[in-house]
Image (cartoon, rainbow, N blue to C red):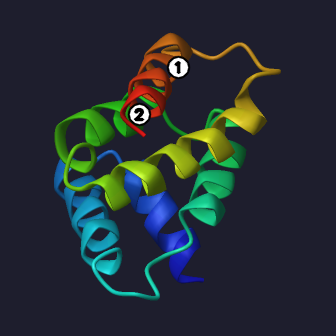
Amino acid sequence: MGHLLTGLCMLHADKTVRALAGELWIDKLRYPQGVNSTHIGDILGHLEKENWAPLKRFTDLAMQSLINISSRHNQSLLEMITAMDSHLNIVKITNYKKLNELQLELTRKS
């Protein structure tokens, strides 16, 4: 349930809600148990596949707040984006190129 809420908030229209979801994800990754970023990525992929929200909301959040915090955060973000991509690579979606660029950048850093 928490992963669904986090995923939904990462795509919310309000920038403050997206920022809070990002901070929650960042904070959870500081603990050994962490957070299941792959599961959140699956949720985001399903939502984006159905055009629930513009992909730009997530890519902006990721590029502004979620990337380059630590190597662990970058690896988890890459897992999230890879899980999203598995749902989106068969669908034509706006800003998909930006998601691929982010994925490529994270792959180079890991």
Please give the name of the residue rendered at 32% of the width and 41% of the height, measured from the top-left corner. 62
Residue type at mark 1 is Asn
Label 2, label 1: how many angstroms apart (C-alpha)?
10 Å
Please give the name of the residue rendered at 16% of the width and 56% of the height, measured from the top-left corner. 16
Q: Position of residue 17 (x, y in %)?
A: 25, 60
Earlier-in-chain disc, 2 versus 1: 1
Can the viewer see residue 50? Answer: no
The answer to whether residue 27 is left or right of residue 50 is left
Q: Compare residues 82 and 48 and report the one nearer the observer.
A: 82
Tag count: 2
Q: Position of residue 31 (x, y in %)?
A: 33, 86
Residue type at mark 2 is Leu
Q: Which residue position is annotated with label 1?
A: 100
Label 1 CA crowd tier, 10 Å (few <14, some 14–19, many 20+) = some
Q: Position of residue 24 (x, y in %)?
A: 28, 73
Q: Compare residues 12 and 83 and report the one nearer the observer.
A: 83
Q: Which residue position is annotated with label 2?
A: 106
Query: Which corner quadrant of the image does residue 28 belong to?
Result: bottom left
The answer to whether residue 61 is left or right of residue 69 is right
